[in-house]
Amino acid sequence: MYEKFLIIVDPQNDFIEGGSLPVSGARSAMQQLAEFVKSNSAEFSTIFVTQDSHPENHCSFSSNGGIWPVHCVRDSSGFEVFPQLQEVLSGLNNVEYCRKGTYSGVEQYSIFAYSDGEITNPDGKKIISVLAKSSSPQIVVCGIAGDVCVMNTLNDLVKIRKSADDIAVAQNFTASIDGGEKLEAFCKENNINLLNL
Ligand SMILES: [Zn+2]
């Protein structure tokens, strides 16, 4: 019997249309995801929600020499989970929130921040230890942005688990800056299943 897990990458207001770093199609993807989670949450042992959680002086901000506008500053409204999704998640008891990018000098596109064979983010370690306890996990990944944080998360996940057999991407719950091309090519190259749920 498969045990299913869902990883929702950065479903945060700043990445939704109207936010400081908006990704086209993010609102619709997150609305569809909220509906899906509402009806299907019980299928998943754990729903992991990752959040960019930056201090004001984060190195990824253009004001600090980085390439992105200021986004997802801890405890700002842009940091919060998209309200329609948050409302659904708040009613569940199988949700784990995981934070990344918490140190000013470190960029972490992936919750695992996998480097030199080590998972360097503590919340990423927690996810992997939960997955490791399952004899046959099925891991579905979705979120924003498909060609940045979702792709980096997948790249680490495949390396850490040394296989992509049990990993899938929910395309309809993912929004990419480039419209989805890069993520789709990456998934095909790495034998990651592409789903529309
Ligand atoms: Zn960020």
Image: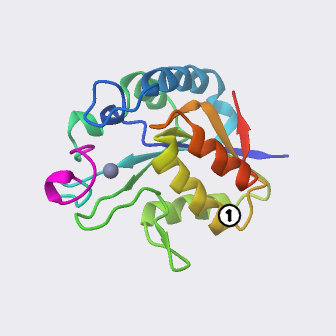
Is residue 24 something one can see in this rendering? yes
Q: Is residue 10 above or below residue 161?
A: above
* Structure colour scheme: rainbow
Residue 8, above or below 102: above
Please tell me which residue lies in front, 105 or 84: 105
Rendered residue at 14%/53% (across/down): 63
Q: Position of residue 50 (x, y in %)?
A: 44, 47
Q: Element type at marker 1?
A: helix
Q: Nearer the viewer, residue 58 or 95?
A: 58
Could you say which is closer to the camera, residue 162 or residue 24?
A: 24
Residue found at x 25% / y 35%:
20
Q: Residue at x 62, y 33 (%)?
A: 171
How would you classify the magenta stretch by its main secondary structure? loop
Residue at the extreme right: 1
The answer to whether any part of residue 46 appears in the image is no
Give coordinates of residue 32: x percent, y percent: 55, 21
> For the magenta stretch, what is the residue range?
61-72
Q: Is-magenta flag for residue 105?
A: no
Residue at far bottom of view: 116
Q: Is residue 90 left or right of residue 6?
A: left
Front residue of 167/135: it is 167
Identify the image quadrant of residue 17.
top left
Q: Residue 55, percent across and down? A: 20, 55
Disc 1 Cβ-to-ligand 1 distance below 8 Å: no
Which residue does the numbered mark 1 point to in the structure image? 132
On the rendered structure, is 54 left or right of 147? left
Q: For the residue marked with disc 1, what is the amino acid?
A: Ala
Residue 27 x %, y %: 43, 23
Q: Residues within 10 Å of mark 1 (few under 14, many from 20)?
A: few
Q: Tell whether position 64 is magenta.
A: yes
Numbered-mark total = 1
Q: Residue at x 85, y 46 (%)?
A: 1
